[in-house]
Image (spheres, rainbow, N blue to C red):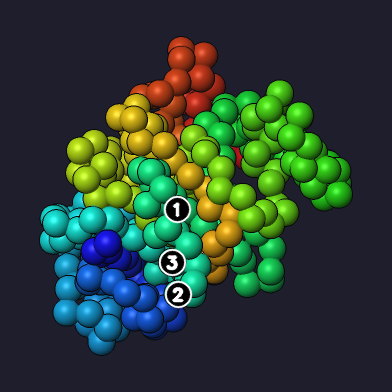
Amino acid sequence: MRVAALVVAHNSARDLPASLGSLAGLPLDRIVVADNASTDDSAAVAACYTPHVLRRANDGFGAGVNAAAASAPDADAYLLFNPDARIAPDDFATLVAALDGGFGAVAPRMRYPDGGFGVSGGSAPSMTKEWIAALRLDEAVPAGVKRRLAGSATLRRAVPMLSYLDVAPSAETRTVDWVSGFCMLVRGAAFRAVGGFDERFFLYFEDVDLCVRLRAAGWPVGAVGGSVADHRESTSTAAVGKRRVYRDGMTVYFGLHGGRTERLAARALRRFPG
């Protein structure tokens, strides 16, 4: 399988050596870095690891991935990889095997530097969940209770939103509604068939939207519990700016895929100060 790794960088010079160094140890056809108008040395750092560096405007993550993918039009698969991510060869091989099993896109578990796990896939987004998070109601639930709720298969089936509480490592490969673009292996033919990322998304929710369209085209999406990638989750935006960009993406997503009530709730949350 010819895999092209696609990395979108924006002021990522600090993170790129670890990320691209990680990719250098994988059996990849090529590494393409889309440098989205960085004002630091991101492009120069990237050029130390690959000759395929695209200098471009900062028009969003999805647009950067699409540009990078266009430079590798014959790839069997694309590894979408954040500039602050790392993955070991064995974990990458597990992802490739999972994709070979018939999925359109797969992603590993997301591990933070402190050893905790983040959300790298799950059930479809819910405006109920978004409002609970905005009002910080979930912070009132003890971590132990969250783990027990997430570990109950019965409750997870009854309340799909509980997938967001899944923090316990699992060796399962599960069919899910979406997986994160922090480290996503997507079948090249499927990615191209659905038109790649929707460039109306600047950042956040573009990966969820892509998975919606992959599934609509008949390609299942899988969370691969037997594979782990590290994610430092760095950001070049302040907390308030990040929240604004997140909610912009959320509003676009529910505008495309939500009902009237969800669209109204998304627009209201976009204006919410908390």
Q: Residue at x 64, y 29 (%)?
A: 160
- Which image quarter is the N terminus in? bottom left
* 199 or 248: nearer the viewer: 199
Judge whether 132 appears above or below 261 on screen: below
Q: Residue at x 38, y 81 (%)?
A: 25
Q: Can you tell which quarter of the image residue 9 is in?
A: bottom left
Judge whether 17 appears above or below 37 on screen: below
Q: Can you tell which quarter of the image residue 249 is in?
A: top left
From the image, tell me which residue sits under label 1: 98
From the image, tell me which residue sits under label 3: 93
Asked whether residue 47 appears in the rendered view, the answer is yes
Numbered disc 2: secondary structure = helix
Judge whether 251 appears above or below 262 on screen: below
Q: Position of residue 62 (x, y in %)?
A: 29, 49
* 48 or 41: nearer the viewer: 48
* 155 or 38: nearer the viewer: 155
Numbered disc 3: secondary structure = helix
Give how far apart the Cα atoms at labels 2 and 3 are. 6 Å
Other residues around mark 3 within 10 Å, as few (<14) / some (14–19) / many (≥20): some
Residue type for callout 3: Ala
Judge whether 187 appears above or below 42 on screen: above
> Residue 89 has which mark?
2
Q: Residue at x 64, y 55 (%)?
A: 171
Tag 2–tag 3 contact (CB < 8 Å) = yes
Residue type for callout 1: Ala
Question: Which is nearer the N-term, disc 1 or disc 2?
Answer: 2
Give how far apart the Cα atoms at labels 3 and 1 are. 9 Å
Other residues around mark 2 within 10 Å, as few (<14) / some (14–19) / many (≥20): some
Residue type for callout 2: Pro
Q: Residue at x 30, y 29 (%)?
A: 217
> Residue 60 has which mark?
none
Q: Give the farthest residue toward the top.
A: 260
